[in-house]
Amino acid sequence: LTNLQVLNNAVTEIKWFRPYVAHRLPALAQLNGVPVSSMEASVGRELFEGLERLPYKAPAAKSAALCPPAEPPAEPNVTPPTWSHPPTQADLRKQEAAEPASKYVSGLMKYAAEAANKIKVMNDLWDGLVEELVTEGLVLDRKERARAG
């Protein structure tokens, strides 16, 4: 394979797409109609050499892998106030005013935990997803060529 056209695929907009493809397909002379430079091949080699030896297990379902169930956040450590005297209306209003803030902070913590889990999953799967998108683009390109030819 010396010439590759990957069209209508968002993966081509990824910053390291050309160096990655140049590394994975060292005989490639042109990518999307543009000659592959020796600099792209060199950068690809530096960045991605050895990547193919890393273990990669494709997720069973993409949606499940990208949106794992979040670990439930720890419940806020809120202790009810102890009253040294019978609570007044003002004391009760202060306590009620603090509850929405506690719920808001709990919600923020849950959201942050979910976001952190999703970022971790993306970091774990990124190389495999890029490789899968490139492969998918190659397969689609071959099918389009077969239909056209």
Image: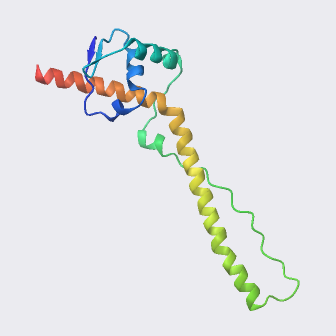
Residue 146 in view in this figure: yes
Question: How many numbered discs, if any?
Answer: 0
In the rendering, at what x and y percent does residue 19 appear? Answer: 41, 20
- On the rendered structure, is 123 left or right of 143? right
In the rendering, at what x and y percent does residue 75 appear? Answer: 69, 61
> 135 above or below 83?
above
- On the rendered structure, is 77 left or right of 69? right
- The quarter of the rendered structure image containing the C terminus is top left
> 53 above or below 128?
above
Quadrant hosting residue 7 = top left
In the rendering, at what x and y percent does residue 89 appear? Answer: 74, 91
* Residue furthest top as drawn: 27
Residue 70 in view in this figure: no
Residue at the image position 30 percent from the left and 11 percent from the top: 29
* Residue furthest right as drawn: 84
What kind of colouring is applied to the model shown?
rainbow
Quadrant hosting residue 134 = top left
- The quarter of the rendered structure image containing the N terminus is top left
Residue at the image position 56 percent from the left and 56 percent from the top: 111
> 25 above or below 98?
above
- On the rendered structure, is 133 left or right of 3? right
* Residue furthest bottom as drawn: 89
In the rendering, at what x and y percent does residue 145 appear? Answer: 17, 21
